[in-house]
Image: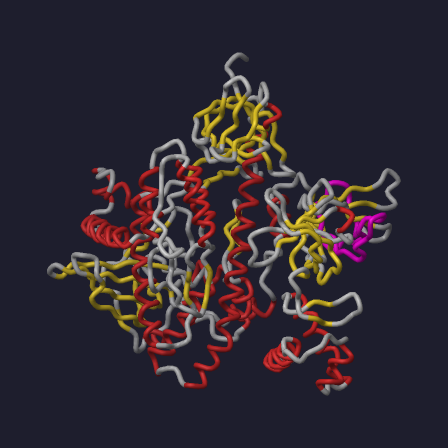
């Protein structure tokens, strides 16, 4: 089906249904009215299904397509283990409560149409009845296979606990799975209130006790891609191992500039390199980014697969790359001592951090030294004599980098850029995939230095292409929702803090100042979390609406084309513009494809983040399962009606259930503390000793109890 034709017809149908003169009709009546022939009836049905799925219209009990009413909405269903569930409506703050009897056998992730029966009142959500399942959220489920005693049939117990019913697997549909196998089950029947869903095994991932099967199961559950398709592998045979003279022709030659890469010790896909020198009072900073588009041409098998993947995914024991290793670790990686093609952003920066001149150009570079963050830190922070001797010839360069990075950072800070220095986890596994340590990932001065330079390049490129008025992909971060900011302001008042809100908006500098005030306080962790939750998620867009968190008017992702598709896509636009300018025909082409690129990149980024988070939670639970009975000191990081969360210095977080506390405690929503009848209380930010009493690797949860020191 032609995508453009489908979009045009969908727009016509949408306009018809939203016309003031429209009266609700069935699909056949709409077909007659619009003159849709029999051959195109299926396309019309697909269009109508899509409009219902998007909430643009609803399907009445009589099978007529109507405009949504206040009491009829479309959302995604999320059940609980207690039977009842919630419908999450896109763009609406509050969910809709659905009793088990009113769920119409909907499953987790299903898109549903809900009739609202009760509006929200103080302390209670809206309530509704699911009247139609529009689209099933999942057709395949990842879980653990178990057979009945006789071995005639089996069940798949879903890994995702929000699927509250097991999947029945009849005899002959087990594909040879045995008890304990992690499997993928395709659902053939979604069941009803008396029958479980039914399915067939379509893939055996491995036994649950085999090393790596647990992470593979998470990858399958998030539909992360596996092997590259054959057509991609075939294209790799055409990729050269070395840069050719033909490739170098017409490029700026920066091979004589002293050039370094600075990455983690284990990094293999090196996509950015730095050159720097000082001329008079000004700095000349070069940010050189791997020219991936030279080898990944538009609409090639490699390009289509990279676009589909959207991003590389960094799980705790493996990387699922956007590009095959032959590219990401080979010809596209800016390895030491070899010629590499790059797209360079050469910036002249004055002593105040203003970028007073720049050039974006195609180039060839040759990296003189492959450095690690640790190695650079030993020079610029520790001033270690052994490191200064080891990296002789680069020490002055690193110190000049540190000097310029400080200037750039101070300039960003002055305009209100927010730095959420939230600790990430570094989880170490043995060769069997068992976690041996969990610790905060160290973000050194060298990490920050590279971030400063990448931010400068990203802003510079974004500003140039915004004013060029060419189609482009930007990284945007919209202003927070006013209501969430008001709620944050009310909450922090309990701790003696405040933020200024003007005309329903908050300036990022206000949040920056708040984070500086709470630095080192007991309530810091909680307020940082709540501040993050009050902000919107950054995403990709064809509109340059600015980046709230960075307090930047112009921002894009230019610096990581090996692992992010938007970067690769804008490199293609930049190169085309540099070489010959972009024709009207090509402008229309980019205007047509870039909204889809931006949307897909935002979706795949969120999928990657969620998968990475699930892997971390699993490995932390596995790690703590080996430390049952041990006592730790942590900080109360969250307080709820069901208990309090305690975070350890290692970044592990567990729950102290309110039921496990000695005495009777009540939750205070005003001060976020648990207050006991005997005068004892537990407050956010309070340091506390806890004992690990349990760790569930299936639920990925950790249980603590308060340790009073009486036990040996």
Foreground: 28 or 303? Answer: 28
Extent of the magenta region: 175-203
Q: Is residue 119 above or below residue 514?
A: below
Q: Position of residue 352 (x, y in %)?
A: 18, 57
> Residue at (46%, 63%) from the top-left corner?
540
Residue furthest left in the image: 280
Residue 679 left/right relative to 168: left
Quadrant containing the N terminus in the rendered view: bottom right
Q: Position of residue 643 (x, y in %)?
A: 57, 30
Q: Position of residue 49 (x, y in %)?
A: 70, 70
Q: Is residue 75 above or below residue 389?
A: below
Residue 196 left/right relative to 645: right
Residue 185 left/right relative to 434: right
Give the colour scheme shown.
secondary structure
Residue 237, visible in the rendered structure: no
> Residue at (26%, 70%) from the top-left corner?
359
Q: Position of residue 50 (x, y in %)?
A: 66, 70
Residue 514, visible in the rendered structure: yes
**Rendering quarter of residue 44:** bottom right
> Count of labels shown?
0
Queried whether the magenta region covers residue 127, the answer comes back as: no
Foreground: 614 or 230? Answer: 614
Q: Is residue 662 above or below residue 218?
A: above
Foreground: 369 or 449? Answer: 449
Queried whether the magenta region covers residue 189, the answer comes back as: yes
**Rendering quarter of residue 140:** bottom right
Foreground: 14 or 314? Answer: 14
Q: Is residue 167 above or below residue 279?
A: above
């Amino acid at each position: 089906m032609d995508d453009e034709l489908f979009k045009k017809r969908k727009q016509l149908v949408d306009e018809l249904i939203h016309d003031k003169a429209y009266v609700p009709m069935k699909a056949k009546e709409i077909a007659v009215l619009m003159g849709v022939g029999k051959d195109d009836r299926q396309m019309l049905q697909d269009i109508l299904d899509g409009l219902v799925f998007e909430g643009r219209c609803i399907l009445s009990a009589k099978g007529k397509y109507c405009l949504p009413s206040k009491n009829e909405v479309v959302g995604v269903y999320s059940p609980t283990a207690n039977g009842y569930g919630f419908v999450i409506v896109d763009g609406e703050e509050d969910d809709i409560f659905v009793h088990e009897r009113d769920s119409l056998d909907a499953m987790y992730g299903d898109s549903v149409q809900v009739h609202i029966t009760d509006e929200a009142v103080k302390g209670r959500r809206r309530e509704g009845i699911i009247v139609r399942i529009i689209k099933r959220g999942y057709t395949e489920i990842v879980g653990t296979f178990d057979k009945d005693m006789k071995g005639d049939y089996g069940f798949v117990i879903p890994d995702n606990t929000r699927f509250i019913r097991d999947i029945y697997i009849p005899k002959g549909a087990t594909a040879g799975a045995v008890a304990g196998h992690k499997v993928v089950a395709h659902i053939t029947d979604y069941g009803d209130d008396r029958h479980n869903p039914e399915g067939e095994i379509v893939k055996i991932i491995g036994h649950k006790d085999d090393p790596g099967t647990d992470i593979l199961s998470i990858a399958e559950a998030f539909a992360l891609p596996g092997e590259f398709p054959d057509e991609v592998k075939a294209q790799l045979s055409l990729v050269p191992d070395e840069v050719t003279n033909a490739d170098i022709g017409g490029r700026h030659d920066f091979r004589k500039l002293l050039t370094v890469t600075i990455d983690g010790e284990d990094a293999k896909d090196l996509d950015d390199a730095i050159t720097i020198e000082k001329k008079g009072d000004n700095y000349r900073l070069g940010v050189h980014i791997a020219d991936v588009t030279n080898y990944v041409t538009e609409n090639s098998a490699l390009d289509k697969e990279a676009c589909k993947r959207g991003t590389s995914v960094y799980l705790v024991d493996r990387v699922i790359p956007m590009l095959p290793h032959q590219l990401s670790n080979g010809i596209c990686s800016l390895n030491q001592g070899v010629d590499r093609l790059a797209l360079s952003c050469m910036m002249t920066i004055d002593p105040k951090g203003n970028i007073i001149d720049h050039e974006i150009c195609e180039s060839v570079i040759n990296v003189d030294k492959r450095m690690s963050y640790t190695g650079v830190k030993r020079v610029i922070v520790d001033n270690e004599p052994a490191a200064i001797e080891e990296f002789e010839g680069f020490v002055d360069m690193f110190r000049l980098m540190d000097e310029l990075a400080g200037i750039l950072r101070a300039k960003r800070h002055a305009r209100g850029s927010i730095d959420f220095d939230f600790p990430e986890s570094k989880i170490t596994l043995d060769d069997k995939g068992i976690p041996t340590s969990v610790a905060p990932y160290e973000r050194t001065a060298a990490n920050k230095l590279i971030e400063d330079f990448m931010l400068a390049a990203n802003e510079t490129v974004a500003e140039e292409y915004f004013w060029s008025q060419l189609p482009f992909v930007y990284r945007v971060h919209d202003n927070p929702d006013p209501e969430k900011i008001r709620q944050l302001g009310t909450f922090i008042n309990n701790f003696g803090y405040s933020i200024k809100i003007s005309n329903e908006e908050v300036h990022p500098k206000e949040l920056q100042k708040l984070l500086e005030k709470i630095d080192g306080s007991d309530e810091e962790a909680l307020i940082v979390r709540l501040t993050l939750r009050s902000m919107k998620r950054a995403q990709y867009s064809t509109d340059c609406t600015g980046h709230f968190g960075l307090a930047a008017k112009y921002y894009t992702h230019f610096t990581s084309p090996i692992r992010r598709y938007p970067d690769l896509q804008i490199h293609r636009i930049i190169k085309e513009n540099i070489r010959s300018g972009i024709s009207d025909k090509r402008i229309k082409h980019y205007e047509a494809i870039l909204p889809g690129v931006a949307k897909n990149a935002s979706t795949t980024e969120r999928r990657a983040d969620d998968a990475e988070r699930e892997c971390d939670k699993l490995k932390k639970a596995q790690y703590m399962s080996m430390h049952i009975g041990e006592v730790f000191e942590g900080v109360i990081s969250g307080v709820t009606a069901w208990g309090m969360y305690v975070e350890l210095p290692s970044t592990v977080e567990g729950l102290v259930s309110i039921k496990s506390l000695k005495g009777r405690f009540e939750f205070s929503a005003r001060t976020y503390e648990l207050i006991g009848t005997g005068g004892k209380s537990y407050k956010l930010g309070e340091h506390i000793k806890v004992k690990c009493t349990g760790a569930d690797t299936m639920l990925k949860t950790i249980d603590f109890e308060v340790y009073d020191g009486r036990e040996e």
